[in-house]
Amino acid sequence: MKKEDLKSGLFGYKKASVFRYIAEIEQEYSEKINEKEILAKKAEEQYLMQYAALEKELQEAQNQIENMKQMLEMKEKEAEQEKRNADIFRKKYDEKAKEAEQKQAKIERIASGMQDLLNEITDRSAQIDLQPVKTGSEENRDSKEENNRNMSMFQRRANQA
C-alpha cells in the first residue's frame, strides 16, 4: 500500500487504512531488520570461526616458540659442554705435546751423546789399530826394564851379578 492509497474521510484519513499502512511499513522494515540480523549473525559466526582459528594458530605458534626456546637452550647447553670438552681436550693435547717435546729433546741429547761416544770409540779404535802389536817376549822385556828402572841402585847391582 502506498500513501496515495489511503482512504480519506470527512476529518482526514480513515483509521483502518492508516493502521494497515503503518502495519505494512512495519512489516517491510521488520523483514529488512530480520535479514540484516541474519546477515549479522552469519558474519558474527564467520568472525567467531576466524577468531577461533586465529587463536588456535596463535596457540600453535606459541607452542612452537616455546619448543624452539627449549631446543635453543638445550643446544646452548650442548655447545657450552662441547666448548668445555674442547678446552679440556686442548689442555690435555698441549700437555702431551709439551711432554713429547721434552722427550724429543731428551732423545736428541741421548742420540747426541751416543754419537759423541761412537765417535770417541771410533777414534780410539783407530789409534789402537795404528799402534804396533807387541809379542809376549817384547812385553816381558819391557816389563823387566820398567822393574829395573824402579829398583834402587843396590837392588840393580844384585840383580845384575
Image (cartoon, helix red, strand yellow):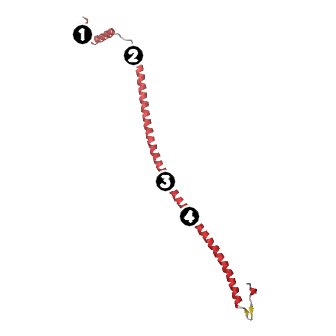
Residue under label 2: 128
Q: Is residue 39 left or right of residue 9?
A: left
The disc labelled 4 sits on which kind of residue? Lys
Look at the numbered disc 4 and give the secondary structure of its residue: helix
Question: Is label 2 in contact with label 4 (beta carbons under 8 Å)?
Answer: no
Going by the image, does 38 lie left or right of 146? right
Name the element at disc 3: helix
Residue at 51 percent across and 57 percent down: it is: 67
At label 3, which amino acid type do we have? Met
Task: State the residue position of label 1.
Answer: 155
Residue 159 picture location, percent across and down: 25, 7
Residue 56's mark?
4
On the rendered image, what quadrant is the C terminus found in?
A: top left
Q: Secondary structure at mark 1?
A: helix
Mark 3 sits on what residue? 74
Dividing the picture into quadrants, the one containing residue 16 is bottom right
Q: Amino acid at mark 1?
A: Gln
Q: Nearer the viewer, residue 100 or 61?
A: 61
